[in-house]
Image (tube, rainbow, N blue to C red):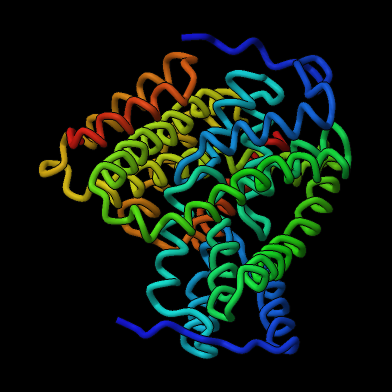
Amino acid sequence: MTAPLHLTLAWADWLNLFVHFLTLSLMSVGGAISTSSEMHRFLVEQHHWLTQEQFNQSIALAQAAPGPNVLFVALMGWQVGMNAGSTGAALFGVLVTMVGIMTPSTVITYAAARWGHRNRDLRAVRAFKQGMAPIVIALLLSTAWIMASSVGGDVLAHWPLWLTAVISGLVIWRTRIHLLWLLAAGAVLGALGMI
Amino acid sequence: MNAPPPAPADHLAHPRPRSLTDLFVSFTLLALQGFGGVLAVVQREMVDRKRWLTQEEFIEDWAVAQIMPGPNVVNLSLMIGGRYFGVPGALAALAGLLGVPLVLVLILAVLHARFADNAVVAGALRGMAAVCAGLIGAAGLRLAGALKKSPLPLPWCVALSVAGFILVALLKCPLAWVLFGLGGLSCVLTYRRLKA
């Protein structure tokens, strides 16, 4: 167990945090989560602005909540601000980390996408877009596999969970049923302890 | 199975968002369905249900979103919004994707200490995660249909997909290697086929 943190953050510290997240944004190919080890080094080990538990919780909570996983960054900013002592600081922390992590990547991607769209008849652009298709499909199937493994672990020991994943996958593949029905069914089965 | 219609010749031939509000609301609703990630929900809502994108367009946009810095789903929503309404569209989609979920996740953080150890809550989250894993797999299967239109022969595409799955899911290779290595190989092969 680590002791709770009580921080005093100066403007220079907030600026440091902001600039660090701006830099991370530029490196976040594959998503912000791929820079999380660097965030850990900076926030937990170097500056002691977050405890190890707070760091882990930020990632786990963002996974459990609806919405993009990048919101774990907002939770880290929130926790840093709470450690600095107030809800106001926490909201400021959310602002600093989210604007930092989003702005550079957003601007670059938007510009690149526009360029690609204007030049979509170039052979190299067509080769890139069509050539990536098998990889995109592989990544989706891999993500499904990794996600089921992370909640389910061993297939034999947790077969109801894997069966739920397979059945919902087949239903979604073959029908146009609204996802919320399936999510609700999964939640109910899970809450009853059946998965 | 609801077979998608033949791919239209241009982007105007399929449904499109009516307004910035439509974009904002659509992305908010979409984000709220994504537990443990939103990407597969984008495919479900944008391609299968609303049909703002064809399967091919989705795959192409996703390839760009993946290779660029930033969260994939954020990049993808920017590109979808931007395609129809320029910068305001990109911002509306982004605001929809992040706005309400941000408020929810902060509320969750505040409640977390109280309910973290509750077995019912933990079980419900496990159940939803299992459904989400199925959802993501289904998105991959749906998109596999688009491989038939690839310039590469179908067996090559399948071989590349299988190799990608083995490298990422089973051997846990870093994503960058797979994207630039296997992805690069696939692009070069496609480039050569397009010449012919």
Instruction: Tell me residue A48's x, y (percent).
Output: 50, 87
A45 is higher (above) or lower (below) than B31: below
Residue drawn where x is 48% and y is 74% of the image = A37
Seen at 61% across and 31% down, the residue is: B29
The number of numbered badges drawn on the structure is 0
Q: Is residue B130 left or right of residue A63?
A: left
Relative vertical location of residue A142 with respect to residue B17 in this rendering, above or below: below
Q: Position of residue B156 (x, y in %)?
A: 47, 36
Task: Examine the rendering and report whether any part of residue B188 can be seen.
Answer: no
Left or right: B17, with B74 as reference point: right
B185 or A31, which is in the foreground?
Answer: A31
Tell which residue pokes out farthest to the left in this image.
A157
- Residue B116 percent location from the top left of the image: 32, 56
**Residue A137 is at least partly visible in this image:** yes
Quadrant containing the C terminus of chain B in the rendered view: top right
- Which residue is rendered at x = 75% and y = 46% of the image? A124
Q: Quadrant of residue A39?
A: bottom right
Figure quadrant of residue A122: top right
- Quadrant assignment, res B82: top right
Q: Nearer the viewer, residue A104 or B183?
A: A104
Residue A96 vs B180, above or below: the answer is: below
Residue A63 in the image, given as x and y percentages of width and height: 44, 52
Residue at left offset 59%, top offset 46%: B101
